[in-house]
Every structure is written in structure tokens, then in C-alpha cells.
Image (cartoon, rainbow, N blue to C red):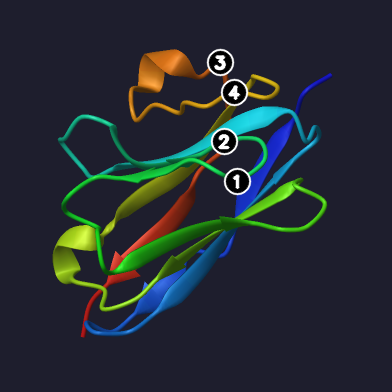
Amino acid sequence: QLQVVESGGGLVQPGGSLRLSCVVSSTYTIVGWFRQAPGKEREGFSCITDRGKIIHYADFVKGRFTISRDGAKTTVYLQMNSLKPEDTAIYYCATVWRPYTHHCSLDKGSYNLWGQGTQVTVSS
């Protein structure tokens, strides 16, 4: 059974960095990162295919966030640098079984399994 667990949130000062981790129980999965701030819709901002060959970023994180997948392909990392107060949100990892795909989506409707979320707070 496919499972997903994310971790690594916390409190950081503006300009600081955090790394989130998402462990999935299968290598043949697309993984997406989403976030939801209070009173706002959940928004997707990065995704990676099962072999890590295709990666997408939303414009508002390009150049600051980096998604990567470990050699075993079961852990996806999100390195977040130059964090801003507006990055404060609950961050979710989501996954769907898609072997050998050449596409990943930032649309939350494309994923069928979600982690529990981890809080990221950027504040001085």
C-alpha cells in the first residue's frame, strides 16, 4: 500500500533555510509539494517524476527552492533557501503511482495520497 510521510518543518528567520523530506513507499511515484497558508487555497509549487528526470517549479519559488530525489528514489527532499514571511504555511507532500512517466503536475487533483503536513513559519 502506497504511503507518504513528510517531515522537517519549523521556525526560521527571514532569509534562512529549511529542508523538508518526504518518504514514499514506492519508487514508481510522482511526488509533488504543496502548501496552504491560513485562509488561502492549497497551492502546488514543485514536483518530480519517479526517476527524477522531470522537475517543475512555480514561479514564486524558482531560484529559491530545490526538489531532489535520493538514489533509492523513495525520499524526496525540498531544500528551501532565502525564505520569506510569505512562505509561512503548512507544507504537504503528495504522491501518485506513475511509473516511467515524463510528466508531473502542480495540480492537486493529480495526486491521490497526501501526507499529514508540516508547519513552516518564517518570522523574526
Alpha carbon distance from label 3 to label 4: 16 Å
Circle 3 sits on which residue? Answer: 112
Secondary element at image label 2: loop
Where residue 94 appears, x then y in whole percent? 53, 32
Q: Which mark is residue 49?
A: 2
Where residue 44 appears, x then y in whole percent? 32, 36
For the residue marked with disc 1, what is the amino acid?
Answer: Gly
Question: Which numbered disc flags the more N-terminal residue, 2 or 4?
Answer: 2
For the residue marked with disc 2, what is the amino acid?
Answer: Thr
Q: Please state, as top left, top right, bottom left or bottom right, where the C terminus lies in the image.
A: bottom left
Classed neighbour count for the residue bearing mark 4: other residues with Cα under 10 Å, few (<14), some (14–19), many (≥20): some
Kindly check if marks 2 and 4 are in contact, taking CB atoms under 8 A apart as contact. yes
Q: Against 20, is 93 above or below?
A: above
Alpha carbon distance from label 2 to label 4: 7 Å
Alpha carbon distance from label 3 to label 2: 15 Å
Circle 4 sits on which residue? Answer: 101
Quarter holding residue 38: top left
Where residue 29 appears, x then y in whole percent? 67, 29
Alpha carbon distance from label 1 to label 3: 19 Å
Question: Which numbered disc flags the more N-terminal residue, 1 or 4?
Answer: 1
Secondary element at image label 3: loop
Secondary element at image label 1: loop
Q: Nearer the viewer, residue 69 or 18?
A: 69
Secondary element at image label 4: loop
Quarter holding residue 88: bottom left
Residue at 45% across, 28% down: 104
Kindly check if marks 1 and 2 are in contact, taking CB atoms under 8 A apart as contact. yes
Circle 1 sits on which residue? Answer: 52
Where residue 16 appears, x then y in whole percent? 32, 84
